[in-house]
Amino acid sequence: MDDTDLKILSHLQENARLSMVEIGKLVGLSSPSVTERVRRLEEQGVIISYRTIVNPKGLKKHITAFVLMEPRDCNKYKKFAMEHSDVVECHRIAGMYSYLTKVVTESVHTLEDYINLCLEYGKPTTLIVLSSPVEHKSFFTESEKL
């Protein structure tokens, strides 16, 4: 992977809707060259997918929380987290807790419902998000895009 690949990735991470022509203009390559590089990055697993970031408030989900779990059975909790509609991320972690789960839900009442369900699997510790000054941050600095 060279500097041009990194610039292409930087622009795609910022705006995945850019056309190959637009990216080519930004990095100084032809559209076919950009297309080939992007295809190669996809094949190498560097680019996994293209997604839309949805504002949870637009879905009437106003509460975000992180739940640290000490489950009695990790596999049962993992299955529960994978199937619950309010869980948007679940990470196996090292340390005092086994899982860090990000929950996005409608209200503190629905968060409480989720926590009550968690009690069946172990001991949850809940951290409610007040604000998120850094979200979806690019892996690249502004100077790396040039």
Image: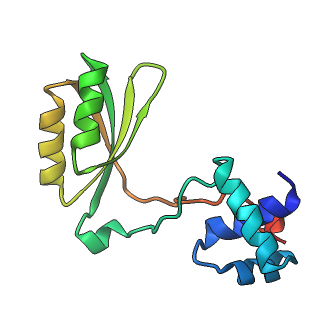
Give the color scheme: rainbow, by chain, secondary structure or one colour: rainbow
Q: Position of residue 54 (x, y in %)?
A: 39, 69
Residue 12 falls left or right of residue 136: right
Q: Residue at x 12, y 36 (%)?
A: 116
Q: Position of residue 92 (x, y in %)?
A: 43, 29
Q: Position of residue 34 (x, y in %)?
A: 77, 71
Q: Is residue 127 above or below residue 62?
A: above
Q: Nearer the viewer, residue 89 or 19?
A: 19
Query: Residue pushed farthest top?
Result: 72
Q: Nearer the viewer, residue 102 or 34?
A: 34
Quadrant containing the C terminus is bottom right
Residue 71: which quarter of the image?
top left
Q: Nearer the viewer, residue 126 or 142?
A: 142
Residue 102: which quarter of the image?
top left
Q: What count of labels does the image hold? A: 0
Q: Residue at x 66, y 51 (%)?
A: 43
Q: Is residue 41 above or below residue 76?
A: below
